[in-house]
Amino acid sequence: MNDYDQARQMAQVLLKSEQRPTREIIQKKVGLAMSTLRISESRDIQIDEDKLVRELETIFNIWIGTATILDNQEDHIPWLPDRRSKISWYFWNRYVRYLEEEKGWAPATINSIAQQTDEILERLEDPQRPGIWDTRGMVVGEVQSGKTGNYTGLICKAVDAGYKLIIVLTGLTDSLRSQTQIRLDESFLGFDSSRVYTASEENKNALVGVGMIPTEKAQYPFSGTTSAQKGDFNRKIVTQFGVVPGNVPILLVVKKNKSVLTNIFNWALAVRGEKDEKSGRRVVREVPLLVLDDEADSGSIDTNPLALDENGNLIEEHDPTTINALIRKLLHSFEQSAYVGYTATPFANIFIHPQVTNANYGDDLFPQSFIINLPTPSNYIGASKVFGLDADPTISLDEIERLPIIRSIDDEKEWMPDKHKKDHNPGEFPWSLKEAITAFILSCAVRMARGQEKEHNSMLIHVTLFTDVQEKVTDQVQEYLTYLRRRLEYGDGNTSSVLKDFEQLWEKDFKPTSKSIADSEPKLVPLDEVDSISWEQISVLLYHAASKIQVKKINGTVRDVLEYEEYKKKGLGLNVIAIGGNKLSRGLTLEGLTVSYYLRTSKMYDTLMQMGRWFGYRPGYLDLCRLYTTDDLIERYEHIAIVNEELRQEFDRMAYEGATPDDFGLKVRTHPDNLIIVTATNKMRASTSISLSYSRSLSETTIFYKQENLNQKNFDVTQELLVNISAYSRTEKYNYIWEKVAYDKIINFLSDYKSHEKCQTANTSLLIEYIKPRLHLNELVSWTVILISKNKAKNSYPIAGHDIGLTKRTNVSKFLQEYRVSKSHLLSPPDEWLDLPKETREDILAESNDIRIKKGEKISPTPSPNVIRSKRPSTNGLLILYPLDPEEITNSKIPIIGFVISFPNSKITAEVEYRVNPTFLEQL
């Protein structure tokens, strides 16, 4: 470890107790660390202290929210709080020290992982719990956001708690499996699995990562797989692996591959299987199994057709696809098992039909126990930051300005047409790719000037699926890079055109972009670091930067991922231009990715998101990153950014309402021009396409503030409305009814009424946005207002000169600052047709029962809400006011005003199409 790293490590330890230290505190701790280091080393130590202070400022200013959770506690026995103090936490504590001391992770990040992994572990069963148990969960995090760090922490804690067999299912390629194994070697095993089969005290030269951290008594789990090219759980390893599951912790990092999964299944049953007298199957008893499915939406989903009736219910069992069947069969063969899927694109997983089961394979992989939505750290660069968001009041999205790092290209068609064949011969190198390579060399030189020479730098070129075409592109890139190197080394004679190209790109692109990002909030790049670098400092480094760059075709071999580790061990940074296709599409991380040249399109949301290798963390060099792509792809990613944000909002809303995974009615916004679909069609077997809008719908307040001032304001606004619309037209069942109320009175009411921010169904700004455009179409121009008054109410209150019986609604909120009505409904169904004449009501009831009879249901005296709204003229809206008895929440005598709006069918309405799962359809 060099002097700078030692000083950083020591300063971080000194700052550990500080939550959000100021620059002054950081400077003080850095000074103390330097003094301590000089004394301990007995020599003068010189480092760039200002740079260290800036780095620590960035580290300590990261903010991370809390995870949101959809939970199903049925058959679950809480255990972690009672057992926590009795567990030694050896592997977890060692992992934390590794993240702090070796990786230099921010305290906020480590604390967040600690909290999140506790929440996940608590939802798994206690590994000491006897009997039969099975947990199915899912963890959702952004692309390249640190899910591996999360599940590594979970593995450490699970093994500490007593789970004996840990199986990590990686992607479908050897390169991704090997990369995952390397990371777990460093952060969990503590030894290089490619060098030793099982580690022992005699193999200290093979220790890596956490294994290098001194502990009182070293512990090493067993690994049945290695990071080598053929290190998967193949037949050769199976025959040599003499470890019996259940005695010691065992880790297997494997591909989702038929033969590999079959090997695990056969091995486990061969050494620990017992015949179950009841079922006749061989099962493994008293070996707690934890299966972590990385990229759980890829390979693991059963895509065979389901036999469903018209209501979406399963008609019969069916045979699942191979990988899905083997994962389920493995879980089904252990009496004590837990499955946790990790993914950034959970569409396919939530579209799994929750009722699927099979006597041979057990339940499908639907996350029936829990779904956890990980928070996005403030320093994460995701789709919403890269591509921006337009404000969309219909789903409560605020505008997010796009980062100025995207460069639109339009000269790629002849070189690489959208639809080319495997024998395509790329033509003349496009100017845009030349600029992208120039930008990469420039970014490497700038990072050198900033003191980041030992960091990895990568450029991604992802333009074709075919390996033969990738080979030709590789040759072209190598040829152009060689040309640039020669020009930078020897010059261009009198013209010096290449150097001028670099300088022009620096002056017209890099300088203003860096300044813009450094000036933005939050501070993603230190301003003084941007201002301190001059062209003269950079120009002398260009040849050195270009000389270090290697051009590599990524074809899935283990060497592709080992290169980063080999360079890191030597204290060097790898500078590489990576050219590939599917091997770069999912999971594989390109370290220090700065420049991306991307043309590969897809019709699927999840595939496009996973191809976005440029998402992630870019500490100290975000301003140097560039994405060169087409306008068409930019538009697609802009749409996906909205879809992603809306989905995360749905998670948060459902979690807040205390919903279970079975309650999660998923709706995913489809592309308006159908250019892209949510996920592969065979992964959406149980989904339905529907269109949603306020047309023929209900909006009701179901959550209220408890603050006296806000409730007083809403009461005053209501009173003002009723006074301004003069005398009521009639009464019915003690309710007061005003007819032919002008639309502007309703808009004024909604403008002044303060609805609860979490009650999206009654967001007043959205309602106004919907009503106003209808007016010039002669829709919603006339309204009926109904003030509900209960005849036998316990309490009453004078409103607009009338003594009103207050409505009672039970508060079911777990939170002190809000009032949430039971079952999330304010409306009493018969109130919705109070504005309609008797003859219309008779027609509504008859039509409602006709529909019930056709569905095979019993007739009812209750009208169908959809039929009511279809019978209301499009010119008329209905506003129902419910004065709620405040006794439920406060000693105040002021009623809490809730409202319901019933919208008629609109002839011309802006609808948004969604793909929905069976639960959403049922709820709708």
Image: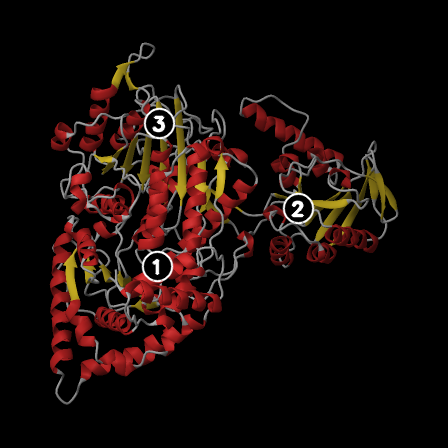
Q: Residues within 10 Å of mark 3 (few under 14, many from 20)?
A: many
Mark 1, residue position: 9
The residue type indicated by label 3 comes to Ser
Q: Is residue 691 visible?
A: no
Horizontal relation, residue 327 to residue 139: left or right: left
Q: Can you give x and y, in whole percent of width and height, for residue 257 in the image? A: 21, 35
Q: CA distance from mark 1 to mark 3?
A: 39 Å
The part of the image, by quadrant, that contains residue 916 is top left
The mark closer to the camera, 1 or 3, is 1
Residue at x-position 47% and y-position 65%: 522
Which residue matches tag 3? Answer: 337
Query: Looking at numbered disc 2 in the image, what kind of residue is underneath it?
Result: Gln
Please give the count of numbered marks on the rendered protein.
3
Q: Are marks 3 and 2 in contact (CB under 8 Å)?
A: no
Give the Cα separation between the discs numbered 2 and 1.
Answer: 42 Å
The percent position of residue 658, horizontal first and vertical second, equals 55, 37
Q: Secondary structure at mark 2?
A: loop
Q: Horizontal placement of 316 versus 850: left or right?
A: left
Q: Are marks 1 and 3 in contact (CB under 8 Å)?
A: no
Circle 1 packing at 10 Å, graded few (<14), some (14-19), many (20+), is some
Which residue position is annotated with label 2? 817
The C terminus appears in which quarter of the rendering?
top right
Q: Which of 382 and 9 lies nearest the eye of the viewer?
A: 9
Q: Is residue 10 above or below residue 888?
A: below
Identify the mark nearer the N-term, 3 or 2.
Answer: 3
Residue 726: x %, y % from top left: 84, 53
- Farthest residue to the bottom: give it: 494
Chosen colour scheme: secondary structure
Single out the mark in the foreground, 2 or 1: 1
Assign a secondary structure to mark 1: helix
Question: Mark 1 is on which residue type?
Answer: Gln
Q: Residue at horizontal 21%, vertical 76%? A: 541
